[in-house]
Image (cartoon, helix red, strand yellow):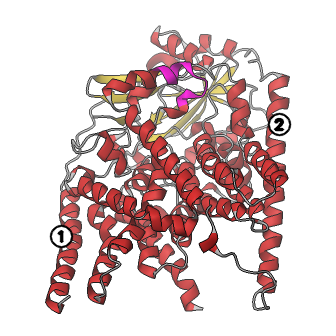
Amino acid sequence: MSGILAAIIAAIVGGVVAGGASFGLVQSLTVVPEPVTAEYVVYGTTG
Amino acid sequence: MIRRAAPLLWAFGLAVVVLGPALAPGYVLQYDMVFVPQQALLPASFGLGGQLPRAVPQDAVMGVLTSVLPGSVWQHIALLAIVVVGALGASQLLRGQPVLVRAAAAMLFVWSPYVAQRLLIGGWSLLLAVALLPWILQAAIDVRRGAAGAGWRLLLLVGVASLTPTGGLLALALAAPVAAGPRSRSPLPHRIALTAGILALQLPWAVPSLLHPAAAASDPGGALAFALRPEGGWGPLVTALGTGGIWNAQAALPTRELLLAPVAAVLLTCLAVAGLRPLSRVLGRAAVLWLGTCAVVGIAVAVLGAWSASSGAMESIVSAVPGGGLLRDGQKWLAPWLLLMSVSAPLGLQRLLRHVTDRTVLASLGIGLVLLPVAVMPDLAWGGLGRMRTTDYPQDWAEVRDALQAPDALQGDIAVLPWSAFRAFTWNRGRTSLDPAPRYLPRTTVVDDSLLVATPDGVVRVSGEDPRSRDVTAALAADRPLAEVLPPLGVAYVVVELTTPGPAVGSAVDGLDPVVLGSTLQLYAVPGPVGPWPPPSRTSVVAVALAFLVAGLVLITSAARTGASWAGARRNRGRPATVPAVDRSKEDT
C-alpha cells in the first residue's frame, strides 16, 4: 500500500471522528429544551 | 510499574471525562438515583414494604454502608466503579490482544448509549452489575476451564451484581450456564454447589417478591410506557443494535437522533459478527455461544415490546406472568449485546485487516475505532454536558429527621406530600428525581407509588402496589381531610416537601399540628390516637431473614476465600510456577 493511500485513509478516519464529534457537540449544545408546563413532575417522556 | 498502572490511570481518566461535575462534593439526585446521608434500615429495605422490592437488597446494603460513611461517599464510589470496573473488565476479557483492540473494547463498552442512558436515568445499581459482567464472564470461563478458586471469585462478583433483581438475573443468566454447563472441566459436585450458590445470592430479592401480594399483577400499562423508544426514526431493531432506546426521551442524549448513530450501530454490528470467530478462540466457543444467545434474547425482549405487532403479547406477559413486570423496561436487557458487541467488534476489525501491513493504516483505523464512540456521542462527556450535577440537602431535612427521632415523637408512619412519586426541587436545579423521603426519613413512608409518564397520547399513570398509597390517593381525590384519613392507616406524621412542582397540598394539612416549618420541608403531626398498621407476617419476616442470612453467608465466604486466594497469589508472585499454564488453543469450550 502506498504512503499516499495510507495518508488518505488516516485523514478520512480522522475527519469522521473529528467531524462527527464536532457536529454532535454543536447539535447537542444548541438543542432548546421544551418548557415544562405541567403542574406535576412526570417520570419521563416517551415521545 | 507505569506500564502496569497505565490501564487503571486511563480508566480513571475516562471516568473523570464521563462523570465530570457528578464527582464534585454532594449528592447527584437524578431520576432513580437517590442517595442520602444515612439511610434507615426499614422493613421496605428488606422487601417487606407495601411496594414490590425493586431496590432490594440495594436499600438494605446502603442502610448498612451509610452507617459507616455518608451516602455521598458511596455514590461517588459507585459512579467511579461503573466506569473504571466496566472499562477494565472489557479490556481484560481480551488480554493478550494488541493495546488498541483492548482500548476499543473498553471504549465501546463504557462510552455507549446504554451506559449513557442508564446513567442519566440514575440506574446506578444496574450499571454496576453491567460493569461486572465482563469480570463475571471471565470468572465463569475460568471455572469452566477448571481453574482453582475461580468459583469463589464468581460467587463474589455475582453477589455484588445482585443488588437489584435485574442485575442478579443478568449475572445469573450469563454465569451459571458457562461455568456449570455441559463439558465444563469443573467437577460435578462443584458445579452443583456453584449453581446453588449463585441461586442463593438471588434469594434476598426473590423471596420478598414471591411473598408480595402483588407479585403476579404488574400494571400492563407499564409494558407500553416503558417499551424501547426508537431513536431518530430508524426503528426498534437498529436502535437496539446501537444499545440505545431507553423509554424516557429525557434520558437520551440529542446525538442519538443524528444519522451517525444508526450508521455506527450497523457498522459495529457487522464488525461484531466478523469478530465472533476470533472471539471464540479467545474466550472459548461455549462462552461466546452462550453470550450470543443471551444477546439475541435481550434484543428480542427489547424489540418485541416496541413493535406494535408484538407489544400486546408483552403486555399480557407483564400482567399475567409472575415476575413478568421485570420485562417491561425492555432496553435494559440489551446488556449482554453491549458486552458481546464491545469485545467482538475490535476483533472483527482486526480480522478484516489481517492482510494489511501498513502501520499507518492499522493505527489510524484502530484509533478510529477507539474514538468512534466519542465521535458518535460526544455529548456524554462531562456528565452528559453538565446534566449530572451535585447538590446538598437543605438543613430542613436534617431537622425533620431529628424531630422524628426525638424521644417524645409519636409512634406511626409518615405520609409525604405533594402526592406524586417524583420531584424537581429548585435546590436541585429543577432536575427530576425520585422522592428522597422514603430513604432519608427514619420511618416507613406512605408515598404515591404510581408513575406518571408523558406519552404522545397524554399522561399515562402506571399503578403501584401499596394498598395504603391507593387509600390516600382516593381520599385526596375526594378532598377528604388527612387528619381523618391517616389514623386508621397507621400514619402519625405528614411531611410536606416545598420548592417542587406537584399536586397542590391545599387544605390537606388542615387540622394537623405543625412540628417543623422550614422553607423547604415541613413536618406535621396527626392529632389524636393512631391505629397500628399490621406489620409484615411472622412467616414473611422469617423467610426474608433466612434469605438474607443464606445469601450473606455465601457472599462473606466467597469474599474471604477470594481474598485469601488473591493474597496467596501475591505471595507466590515471582516464584517458579508449579502448575502448568492453561493452553487455550486446545479448548473447545
The picture quadrant where one finds residue B55 is top right
| Mark 1 residue crowding within 10 angstroms, few (<14) / some (14–19) / many (20+) | some
Q: Are marks 2 and 1 on the same chain?
A: no
Q: Label 1 is found on which chain of the structure?
A: A
Quarter in which the C terminus of chain B is drawn: bottom right
Percent of width and height locating residue B116: 40, 55
Quarter in which the N terminus of chain B is drawn: bottom right
**Is B120 situated left or right of B559 in this image?**
left
Visible in this render: residue B204?
A: yes
Secondary structure beneath dot 2 equals helix
Visible in this render: residue B499?
A: no
Q: Nearer the viewer, residue B342 or A21?
A: B342
**Is A35 situated left or right of B92 in this image?**
left
Q: On screen, B550 above or below B581?
A: above
Q: Label 2 is found on which chain of the structure?
A: B
Tell me the amino acid under the disc marked 2. Ala
Q: On screen, B37 above or below B361?
A: above
| Mark 2 residue crowding within 10 angstroms, few (<14) / some (14–19) / many (20+) | some
Q: Residue at x 32, y 58 (%)?
A: B270
Q: On screen, B467 above or below B351?
A: above
Percent of width and height locating residue B512: 59, 20
Q: Which residues are magenta?
A: B316-325
Q: Residue at x 73, y 41 (%)?
A: B41
Q: Nearer the viewer, residue B237 or B560?
A: B237
Secondary structure, magenta segment, majority class: helix
Percent of width and height locating residue B518: 53, 39
Tell me the amino acid under the disc marked 1. Gly
Q: Which dot marks residue B545?
A: 2
Q: Residue at x 74, y 61 (%)?
A: B185
Q: Nearer the viewer, residue B165 or B67?
A: B165
Q: Residue at x 27, y 62 (%)?
A: B376
